[in-house]
């Protein structure tokens, strides 16, 4: 699917959200200025190994690993880009030439490259560091749109929990032994993660909403956001009320633990081996549910966030600032960070992965767990719906690595789609020697089971395959 996306980007050409860089044997120095500009403006997509005309020049194959390593190291270096960022870089080969694709989300922070602030327009990147009006406007736009940046100047260290900050430090060091938080004082950790900031409207300094939600005492959080809670409900027998409930009104780290514990209490955990290691599919699913409902919530909206475990489904709701409307297509969507500071802390302490991976993981493990496909709906209220197989109270004590048995024709169609994602029904008829009606019916069965999906038109679209069957 990424090849089709990149071909579309190449046809569109450079613009506000697209940039090409040749980078044949090394990373161009101005790549990092572009990354910074994308972070500061509306995000964007960066292709390395493509010239200004949109022609694929490719990257020297013996330099690919070095370029990837240099890029990742540099964007994580606070002396180069501050605040540092975490971006994934994807290698892809087109017409025998290797290029690198980098998706850069819009950030809630203002970033600097070599101490300079860059912004983006249709003509490219431009340095606005010495333009006080543009810099102030950029900061104010970030603070207005991203409510996690709201500054509370009267909040003090005494209003936060040092034990939570210490726990975050230990978790971060566990993820990476040389993590910079290892030797930082508590206040310096908060400052480095942009949880202590300046309000450009009042010229005051203080802890942000993100810092308070992550590390605040319960009374501090509820003083700032009185409506803050995550409602966990089990509703199987008593459908008018509930069978069990946990009303969670605490910091986001402890909230995460209580969401996982609620799922462990009320849902089975089928036996599943990934490679040579057993994996808790249930916990994998709820890791994504918990991180989604805590990271991507619009906290100034009083709509109560909830997770319901019912007889035949898991259902979640949380307030949202949508960047699109309708059902999310896992094969063709651009992830957008709603609370990047909170998301970064979750990633640092191992409670979340890179942006966009959550949807893929949810699709993969939901299929393994209940042989179904989750539905994610992007509106003012964000919803996740995960169908459950019945009975939900009996664990599966056999491997489910092969979650469904396919017919010979289904396997043949699946194999053809893997080899050629743009294959048409007519081509399948010719290859497999089956009628159009048979091909159409079999494809419909595969789509209903969530094994394959299609994006685009019948003539110019493309097929994609569920992660489990790749």
Image: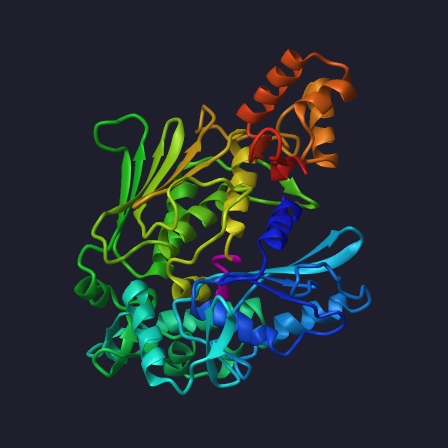
Q: Is residue 323 above or below residue 374?
A: below
Hey, which quadrant is residue 296 in on the image?
Answer: bottom left
Q: Is residue 185 above or below residue 66?
A: below
The magenta segment is 347-354
Q: Is residue 109 above or below residue 14?
A: below
Indicate whether residue 253 is drawn in magenta. Answer: no
Q: Is residue 53 left or right of residue 59?
A: left
Indicate whether residue 348 is drawn in magenta. Answer: yes
Measured as percent of width and height from the top left, residue 404 is found at: 63, 25
Q: In this view, does 284 lie above or below 446?
A: below
Residue 177 visible to an observer of this rendering = no
Residue 120 visible to an observer of this rendering = yes
The total number of labels drawn is 0
In percent of the image, x 46 and y 83: which residue is there? 184
Measured as percent of width and height from the top left, residue 95 is found at: 78, 50
Of helix, strand and loop, which mostly describes the magenta segment?
loop
């Amino acid at each position: 699917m990424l090849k089709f996306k990149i071909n579309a980007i190449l046809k569109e050409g450079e613009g506000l959200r697209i940039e090409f860089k040749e980078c044949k044997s090394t990373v161009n120095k101005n790549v990092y200025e572009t990354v910074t500009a994308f972070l500061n403006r509306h995000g964007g997509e960066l292709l390395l190994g493509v010239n200004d005309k949109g022609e694929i020049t490719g990257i020297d194959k013996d330099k690919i690993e070095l370029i990837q390593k240099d890029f990742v190291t540099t964007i994580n270096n606070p002396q180069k880009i501050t605040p540092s960022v975490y971006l994934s870089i994807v290698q892809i080969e087109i017409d025998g030439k290797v290029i690198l694709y980098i998706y850069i989300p819009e950030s809630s922070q203002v970033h600097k490259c070599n101490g300079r602030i860059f912004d983006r327009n249709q003509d490219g990147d431009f340095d606005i560091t010495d333009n006080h009006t543009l810099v102030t406007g950029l900061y104010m736009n970030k603070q207005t749109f991203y409510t996690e940046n709201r500054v509370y100047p009267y909040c003090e260290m005494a209003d936060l929990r040092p034990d939570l900050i210490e726990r975050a430090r230990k978790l971060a060091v566990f993820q990476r032994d040389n993590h910079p938080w290892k030797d930082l004082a508590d206040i310096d950790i908060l400052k480095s993660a942009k949880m202590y900031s300046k309000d450009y409207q009042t010229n005051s300094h203080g802890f942000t909403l993100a810092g308070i939600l992550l590390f605040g005492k319960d009374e501090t959080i509820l003083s700032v956001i009185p409506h803050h809670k995550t409602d966990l409900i089990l509703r199987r027998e008593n459908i008018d009320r509930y069978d069990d409930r946990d009303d969670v009104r605490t910091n986001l780290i402890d909230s995460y633990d209580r969401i996982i514990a609620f799922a462990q209490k009320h849902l089975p955990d089928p036996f599943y081996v990934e490679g040579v290691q057993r994996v808790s599919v249930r916990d994998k699913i709820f890791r994504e549910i918990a991180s989604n409902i805590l990271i991507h919530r619009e906290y100034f909206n009083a709509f109560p966030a909830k997770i319901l475990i019912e007889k035949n489904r898991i259902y979640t709701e949380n307030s949202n600032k949508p960047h699109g409307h309708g059902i999310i297509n896992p094969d063709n969507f651009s992830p957008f960070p709603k609370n990047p500071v909170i998301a970064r802390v979750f990633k640092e302490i191992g409670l979340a992965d890179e942006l966009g991976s959550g949807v893929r993981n949810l699709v993969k493990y939901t299929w393994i767990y209940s042989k179904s496909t989750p539905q994610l709906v992007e509106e003012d209220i964000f919803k996740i719906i995960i169908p459950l197989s019945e009975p939900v109270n009996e664990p599966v004590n056999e491997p489910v690595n092969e979650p469904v048995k396919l017919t010979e024709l289904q396997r043949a169609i699946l194999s053809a789609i893997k080899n050629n994602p743009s294959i048409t029904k007519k081509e399948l008829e010719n290859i497999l020697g089956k009628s159009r009606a048979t091909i159409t019916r079999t494809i419909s069965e595969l789509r209903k089971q969530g094994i394959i999906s299609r994006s685009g038109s019948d003539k110019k679209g493309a097929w994609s395959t569920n992660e489990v069957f790749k």
